[in-house]
Structures are given as C-alpha cells and as structure tokens.
C-alpha cells in the first residue's frame, strides 16, 4: 500500500462538481463500450481491474472496443492471488497487454480513491461514488462475500424505477463473524457498475420504508459474471437505522480495502494503429489471359472492429 501513496488521489465532494439533477438509476454495463460479461480466468483482482475496469475505461475514452488481458498481472505473485494494490502498481509501472498479445502497451496513470474513513463520512463516500458512476465511470471494491447477508428487494410503492428488480436478492448487511468458523477472512474484488436510488431493502424488517433504507449500488462479480445489489446502508459500520442488525461489538460493513477505486488513464493515449493487411494472389504468374484469385486478411493491432474494406485495381 505504501507504494501507492503518490499515485492515489483521495476524493472528497469539495473537489467534485456535483450534478444539479442526479439520475436516479445508472447501469454502465449497458454502455456499448462495456466488455462482454464472462467468468474470470485466474484471480479476481487482476481480472476485474484489467479485463472489466481498465478495458471499459480505455474503450470509453477511445470510442473503441479494445479488450485487455489480465494474464501478465496474474503472474506477479508466483501463481498465488495477488494483492489488488500490487496489481494496480503493475498496471501503472508495466501496463496491460491487448487480448491475444504478450506485450504490455498501455499504462494506468493512477487511481482515485473514495475513502471509507469512519461512520460519519459514509454519506460523503456514497455521494462521491454515485457522482463518478453517473459520469460514466465504473469502480472497484474489495469485500468478503462470505459475510454478506441478503433479503429480497421489497416493492417501493412510490416509484416504478424499482419494478424490474423487485424480488431479487440484495445484500443489506455484513456479519463479519465468518459463517464458517475455521475459514480465514478473504478479500474478493468486485466491480461497481451503477446504482438505483429507489430500491428498498427493509433493513429492520418492520415493513415500513424508514429513512436510510432506500438506495443500492449495482455490482458485477467476475467469479460468477452475475450482477447483484448492495444496499447503501450496508456500507456503514453501525447503521443509523433503528432496529438494524449488528454484531455484539457493533461493527459491520460490506466494504474491504477502505473504499471505492476509480482508474484514471493518461490524458494522451497512443494514436490509433492502422490495420495490417495480408494479401495473397493465386496464381502469381502465367500466360495471358489469366484468371487470378485474390484473398486478403485484415487484423487490427488495437482490437478495433473493421466495418468494411474495398479493392481498387489499377490498369
């Protein structure tokens, strides 16, 4: 973590331009630049950081569909699960290769950090993260999913923006007493892709929408390639909602690694590399009149889609 000090910007709302009218629902996985959903290959942190988060931010910035591979980042800890901060440093110092190549070409500039400091700053962290998501970014977060406790999303009668999600599971608190006593606490890296301010988790199970029970972040888990919801209230150590569940020591939160992480790319990215065309002609010689069959293959080093190509023969 020490190596990241100069490369991490701790974000507060005082240095961000808040929206005058924040959208109530955001799902950035619907963007044309979001990579295809798939289950992780290798460890969770390299896959989520490189193949989801970095791929998306680069493609969105360049208006391409460039896919990056996490296979180099997977090797930095001799085959063992690497610390997410080591993965981030690797992305900054070495870079990430385009899918199908071994040459790391593009480097991360640094990360912005929406920090979870104490119970009082959780609303600031949630608001800053919502703004980043509404601006089109996606965010990384560490957690221990074995501690998650869920319930079904209740119908919020005051809106229709929750209708498609009613009845689905939502994590509403984290019992940090491991469910399996012999199991070590673990940190799994997941990707925050959006939010819905109108989702209702009945945290205290009294059947009434209490202040603080509305709103949830939408996450993508690379281990399952599935989306899931985590209530805003689940990020508190101690819930402000009366009657909310808690451990005996009063401490619980779904968030590990201290906050949300936003990847920041360099202002100037490498220029687009032109496609590579390989032309074959059969036969290449003979007596006139001669029929020649031409065939061409086209590849793009940047992974861009090639919409069309055309032939133009001279005299």
Image (cartoon, rainbow, N blue to C red):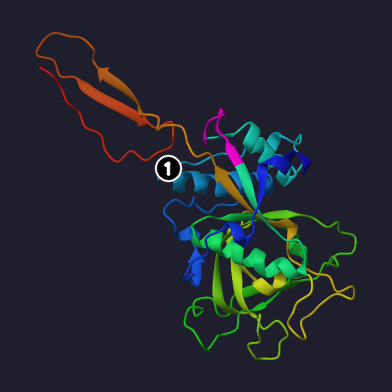
| Residue most extreme to the bottom | 207
Q: Can residue 27 be seen in this view?
A: yes
Q: x and y percent of residue 123 in the render?
A: 67, 70
In the image, taking residue 101 as reference, residue 223 lies left or right, namely: right
Residue at position x 25%, y 18% from top? 282
Residue 259 or residue 14, whichever sits in front: 14
Q: x and y percent of residue 69 in the render?
A: 57, 39
| 239, above or below 97, in the image | below
Residue at position x 75%, y 77% from top? 239
* 201 magenta-colored: no
Q: What stretch is highlighted in magenta?
A: 98-109
Residue at position x 48%, y 78% from top? 161
Residue at position x 50%, y 64% from top? 27
Q: Can residue 219 be seen in this view?
A: no
| 270, above or below 189, in the image | above
**Res. 83 image quadrant:** top right
Q: x and y percent of residue 293 in the render?
A: 21, 23
> Which residue is disc 1 drawn over?
62
In the image, taking residue 106 as reference, residue 31 lies left or right, namely: left
Residue 103 or residue 260, whichever sits in front: 260
* 103 magenta-colored: yes
Q: Residues within 10 Å of mark 1 (few under 14, many from 20)?
A: some
Q: x and y percent of residue 233 in the render?
A: 69, 74
């Amino acid at each position: 973590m020490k190596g990241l000090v100069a490369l991490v910007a701790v974000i507060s709302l005082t240095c961000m331009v808040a929206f005058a009218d924040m959208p109530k629902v955001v799902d950035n996985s619907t963007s044309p630049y979001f990579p295809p959903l798939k289950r992780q290959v290798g460890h969770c942190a390299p896959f989520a950081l490189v193949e989801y988060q970095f791929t998306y931010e680069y493609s969105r910035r360049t208006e391409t569909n460039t896919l990056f591979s996490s296979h180099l980042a997977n090797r930095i800890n001799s085959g063992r699960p690497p610390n997410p901060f080591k993965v981030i440093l690797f992305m900054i110092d070495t870079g990430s290769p385009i899918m199908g190549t071994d040459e790391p070409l593009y480097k991360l500039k640094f990360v912005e950090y929406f920090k979870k400091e104490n119970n009082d700053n959780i609303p600031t962290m949630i608001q800053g993260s919502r703004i980043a998501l509404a601006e089109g970014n996606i965010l990384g977060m560490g957690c221990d999913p074995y501690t998650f406790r869920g319930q079904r999303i209740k119908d919020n009668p005051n809106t229709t923006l929750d209708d498609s999600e009613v009845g689905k599971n939502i994590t509403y608190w984290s019992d940090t007493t491991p469910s399996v006593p012999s199991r070590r606490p673990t940190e799994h890296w997941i990707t925050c892709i959006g939010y819905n301010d109108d989702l209702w988790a009945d945290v205290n199970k009294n059947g009434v929408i209490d202040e603080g029970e509305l709103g949830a972040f939408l996450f993508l888990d690379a281990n399952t390639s599935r989306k899931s919801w985590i209530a805003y209230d689940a990020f508190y150590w101690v819930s402000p909602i009366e009657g909310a569940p808690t451990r005996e020591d009063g401490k619980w939160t779904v968030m590990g690694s201290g906050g949300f992480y936003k990847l920041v790319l360099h202002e100037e990215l490498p220029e687009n590399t032109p496609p590579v065309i390989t032309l074959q002609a059969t036969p290449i010689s003979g007596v006139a009149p001669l029929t020649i069959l031409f065939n061409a293959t086209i590849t793009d080093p940047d992974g861009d889609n090639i919409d069309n190509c055309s032939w133009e023969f001279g005299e």
